[in-house]
Image (cartoon, grey):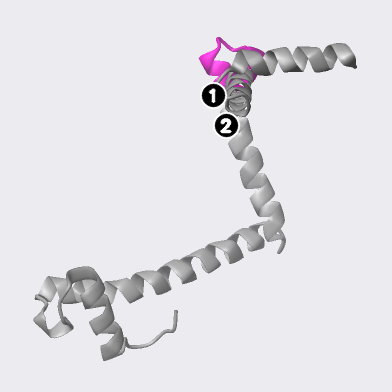
Amino acid sequence: MERGPMSQDQKEQIAQDRYGKGYEELGTNEKKAVGGVKGGQIGGELGGQARKEQMANEHGGDVHAAYAEMGSKGGETRKDQMAEEHGGDVSAGYSEMGHQGGEKGGNARKEQMAAEHGGDASAGYSEMGQKGGQA
């Protein structure tokens, strides 16, 4: 987004998009909100860039190392949370997660086989068994 004052055309467009009327028809607070649209977009772009530069500076100029550390901290936090949820046994948390993932995957496969066999999942399992027997 370009910096500097907002053009009248930009104000009119935002006023139409947000309020369905021309800029001059807006009340004071609505006009402020129109101006804030551009300011918020510029601030968001600059804020993200500034944060990226700050993270790079904190890691010797390597922003990728900063993001890697951020991901690692998030992973450690989740691991600690799972351990707490399972009486200190983080492996029980991973087992439960795997079991839930397996159920979701199995149900998804069952639905897929039913769709491939006219709604009859058992026909899909029969076919799978026959093919397995032939192999």
The kind of residue on which mark 1 rests is: Gln
Q: Is residue 67 shown in magenta?
A: no
Crowd around label 2: few <14 · some 14–19 · many ≥20 (10 Å) = few
Q: Residue furthest front?
A: 118
Q: Main secondary structure of the magenta part?
A: helix
Left or right position of 31 against 5: left
Quadrant in which the C terminus is drawn: top right
Vertical relation: 58 (above or below) 111: below
Labels 1 and 2 touching (C-beta < 8 A): yes
For residue 12, side relative to residue 51 (left or right): left
Residue 100 image offset from top left, x and y in percent? 58, 18
In the rendered image, the quadrant that contains the N terminus is: bottom left
The residue range painted magenta reads 82-101
What residue is rendered at 17% in x and 73% in y?
A: 20
Q: Which mark is residue 81?
A: 1
Q: Position of residue 44 (x, y in %)?
A: 43, 67
Q: Quadrant of residue 17?
A: bottom left
Q: Is residue 78 above or below residue 134?
A: below
* Residue occupying the point 66% across, 39% down: 72
Q: Quadrant of residue 90?
A: top right
Q: Residue 93 lies in magenta, yes or no?
A: yes
Circle on res. 77 = 2
Amino acid type at mark 2? Thr
Q: Position of residue 113 (x, y in %)?
A: 63, 24
Task: Tell me if I can see residue 22 in this picture.
Answer: yes
Which residue is pictured at 67% across the width and 59% down the height? Answer: 63
Judge whether residue 95 can be spotted in this image: no
Question: Alpha-carbon distance for marks 1 and 2?
Answer: 6 Å
